[in-house]
Amino acid sequence: METATTLLLAVHLLAMNVASAGPLAGAWLRRLSLRDGAANSDLLERGARATFRGSLLGLAIGALVGGAMLLAPSAGMRAALRRFPADAYWFAGAEILFSAACIFGCRKLSRRPKLTWLLAIVAATNLLYHFPPLMAVLGELAADPHWADDETLHRKALIRLWIRPEVMSLWAHFALASMAVGFTAALAVCHRAVRNEAEQVDDRTARRLAGWALGATILQIPVGIWLLLASDEAAQQSMMGESWLATIGLAGGVWVALGVMQSLATIAWGDSDRRQVNRACILLALTVLFMSVTLRVSRRAGVEPPVADKPTVDVAQ
C-alpha cells in the first residue's frame, strides 16, 4: 500500500507540475510563432497547442489521482479531511474547473497572444497559489494530527498554517519544480510535433526553454536546503541517515537532479538533440519519484503509532 501511494504521489506531482507551468510555456511558444520572420512558425503553434492540451491532461490526471489519494483507506488522511469545512471542497473543485477553463481558452486563442498570456498567467497562479500549500497542510495533518491546534481549519487558520516555514519551503520547491518540468515537457512536445525531416525545433527556442528549466532546477538547491532546515528534527534525522529509505530517496534525488542539470545545460548551450531532451524528461520523472519517497518517509518520522491499551489482569484472589 505504501509503495502504491508513493507512486501515486509522484504521478500526481508530475501531472500538477505540467498543469501549473505548461500554460506559461505554451503562451511563450505562441508569442514566438506570431513574430515576423519566426522560423517554423507552424511548428511552434502546433507545439503551443499541444502544450496546452498536455496541461489540460495533466490537470485532469492530477485532480483524479489526488482525489484517489485523499479517498484512500488511511485513518490519518480521513481525520485530516474532517478538519476542513465542507465548502472548502466545493471551492477546490471550482478552482480546478476555473483553471481548466483558462487553459482551454489559451488553446483556442491562436491569434490573440496577449490574451493567451493573461489566461496562462491566471491559470498558473491560481493553481500555484491554492493547491501546493493545501496539499502540504493535508499531508502534515495526515502524518501528525497534532501538527495544527485548530480543530476546524477555516480560511484564517489555514493561512496561518500556510506561512509556516515547512509549508512555505515546500510551496517554493513545488513552484520551481513546475517550471522545470513544464518547460522541459514543452520542449519535448515541440520535438514530437515535427512532421517531416525539413522541420526541426530551432536552437533559439530549445535554448530558451531549456534555460528556464535549468534556472529553476539550479534554484532548487537553496530551496532544498531551506526545506531541509524547515523540517522538524525527526524528519531531518531520518533524511540524514536514521531512515535508510529516506536517506536513499534524498541522495538519489540529488544525484539524478545533477543529471537533469547536465542535460538541460547541454541543450541550453546548443545541443538540442531529441535524445538529450528525452533524457532530461526521464531524469526529471525519477527525481520526483525519489523526492516523493523522501517526503512520505520523513513525514512519518518521529510520529508514534497509536498503541492499544494493554488489558489489566486482576491478581487478587
Image (cartoon, grey):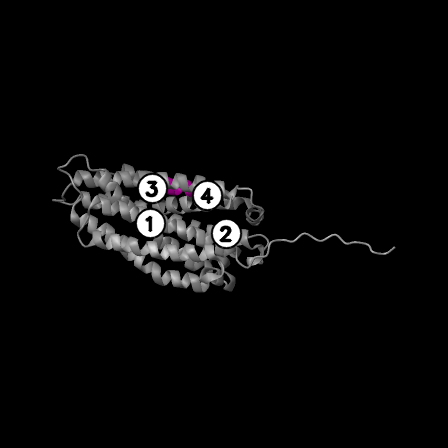
Q: Earlier in the sequence, mark 4 or mark 3?
A: 3
Asked if the magenta segment contains residue 100, the reply would be yes
Specify whether residue 35 is in view: yes
Q: CA distance from mark 4 to mark 3?
A: 16 Å
The nearer-to-camera label among 1 and 4 is: 1
The crowd level at tag 4 (other Cα within 10 Å; few <14, some 14-19, many 20+) is: many
Q: Earlier in the sequence, mark 4 or mark 2?
A: 4
Q: CA distance from mark 1 to mark 2?
A: 22 Å
Range of the magenta residues? Answer: 96-102
Are the residues at dot 1 and dot 4 in contact (C-beta closer than 8 Å)?
A: no
Residue behind mark 1: 284
- Label 4 secondary element: helix
Q: CA distance from mark 1 to mark 4?
A: 20 Å
The nearer-to-camera label among 4 and 3 is: 4
Pinpoint residue 31: horizontal percent, then vertical percent.
21, 45
Give the residue at the far top of this rendering: 195
Q: Earlier in the sequence, mark 2 or mark 3?
A: 3
Residue behind mark 3: 55
Q: Please identify the quadrant where the C terminus is shown.
A: bottom right
Q: CA distance from mark 1 to mark 3?
A: 17 Å
The nearer-to-camera label among 1 and 3 is: 1
Identify the residue at image location x=44%, y=41%. 65
Asked if the magenta segment contains residue 128, the reply would be no
- Label 3 secondary element: helix
Pinpoint residue 101: horizontal percent, then vertical percent.
36, 39
Q: Amino acid at mark 1?
A: Leu
